[in-house]
Amino acid sequence: MKVLLISNPPSRLQKPDFPPVGIASLGAISHYAGYDTLLIDSGFSTISDVVRQAYYYSPDIIGITCWTIDRGRVWELCHELKKKLPSVFLVLGGPHASLYPVHVFLKTYAEAVVVGEGEQTFQELLTAWKENRDLKGIPGLALRGPENAVLDFTARELISNLDDLPFPFYQGFPHFSFSRYAGFPTLPCPTAAIISSRGCVFDCTYCGSTQFWGQKWRYRSANNIIKEMKWLSEAHQVRSIYFFDDNFLVNHQRVSTICEEIIRQRWNVSWSCCSHVKMVNRELLELMHRSGCVSIDFGVESGSDIILKNINKKQTRTDIERAFELVHKAGIKPRAYLMVGNKGETIATIDETIDMTGTIKPHSSIGASLLWLLPGTRVFSEACANGFIGHDYWLRSDDVPYNLQEYSYKEMCALRQRLMRGIARQKGGLVPLLNFHLKEIYYRYPFLSYMRSLVPGWLK
């Protein structure tokens, strides 16, 4: 039996940062079960290229990741695949498909949707398919019913021990090498991404993590993480690791064990992670630095306590300033994700954020992105309750809507412009000014993102 797994095709071709870990993990389930498995990273291919590869491979089952962003490309890919391979069993998974399986059936000819965490559901699907058994009753599998309804559906319990999952099957990508990927700005290439936990202990209004992963934070053991790092280093010559968790530093003992083992084995490895500002302390940061931690990304979002409270961030400006001071002192580069357009945003709150960046001095300020109304988030639910948007939006449009309940799009862009310009002036010098103008051009002409690999490292 042949299995083909395809990542969500992006709307703009650009060099991806990392290989798609999601389909590589599902590919491991398929490969170690004995099935012929091919993986396609759509970030490197046009839809016609993907369809051509699929046609020549002639799989029995095709699985496609479906995110809310670029979901229109998934609908197009599914349509083209079914034209070339009408008898193939097509199944979708991922955040958007999990939330709206009926929408998947209305937009595509897919036979099924894997809802939520996919490894166990996908494994049972493959086994049942191979043995020609009825697929009904597989927990987590939504099957197409009459008039595009979902047949009797049973939710699947979350995986209790993430250590039981195999490492990603990167060998399934043709001519695979981590050197093909852009990696992470603060880390030496080649860089690999590791997902060491699922879920988050926080519940910010703009994030759908708890909707997809549940309210529980689950994590792989330190020993399991060390094994994957060693495997990536020896089998793939990886020089650095980015921990792609929502919040890597929740369990301090686990992080300390990983750091101590890196130091004990004298690994020359650099690494970075994401976390919440309340998760750091001096002792942990010093240990992280000694083990090779180069940078930490924080979801700062705003310098206004009003905005931080409105988005349920569970942090204050004082918390942010304290965390950045500790990270700087430890010799680690703190990076700040910023956002524009949350409930209560004004020129005054934007100016508070500008003022705060002058205090915390982030190594870089990522994004200043406009707030999207993403399904599965509290801010989307509130917008629905206010009558601003409805769930049928995702059937009527392939775009992702901004939160325009208080401002027009033009006004939101002006607020973002004020924030980016203010941060550049706070930093002073030529490099921040050039960086500001590059971001300004990108936001105005997003199709130029394919040229980002040409931007020198000192400007990122």
Image (cartoon, rainbow, N blue to C red):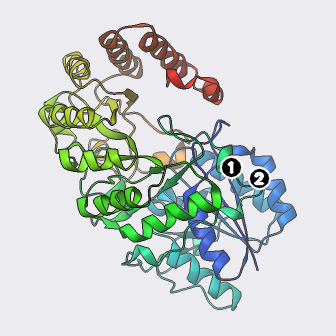
Q: Do the numbered discs 2 and 1 sit on residues whose CB atoms are within 8 Å?
A: yes
Identify which amino acid the numbered label 1 is placed on: Ser
Q: How many marks?
A: 2
Identify which amino acid the numbered label 2 is placed on: Val
Question: Which of 275/240 is in front?
Answer: 240
Whether 72 is drawn above or below 116: the answer is above
Residue 50's label in the rendered image is 2
Q: Identify which residue is drawn at 63% across, 86% down.
A: 127
Whether 105 is drawn above or below 7: the answer is below
Q: x, y percentage for residue 307?
A: 19, 32
Cα separation, mark 2 vs mark 1, equals: 7 Å
Which of disc 1 and disc 2 is earlier in sequence?
1
Residue 23 horizontal side relative to residue 137, left or right = right
Q: Identify which residue is drawn at 37% across, 17% down.
A: 420
Residue 104 visible, this angle:
no
> Callout 2: few (<14), some (14-19), or many (20+) C-alpha neighbours within 10 Å?
some
Image quadrant containing the N terminus: bottom right
Question: Which of 54/137 is in front?
Answer: 54
Whether 274 is drawn above or below 60: the answer is above
Q: Identify which residue is drawn at 44% across, 61% down.
A: 265
Q: x, y percentage for residue 326?
A: 20, 37
Question: Which of 16/309 is in front?
Answer: 16
Residue 277 horizontal side relative to residue 67, left or right = left
* Label 2: element kind: helix
Q: x, y percentage for residue 262?
A: 41, 57
Residue 42's label in the rendered image is 1
Residue 328 visible, this angle:
yes
Q: Identify which residue is drawn at 68% across, 44% down.
A: 180
Whether 7 is drawn above or below 353: the answer is below
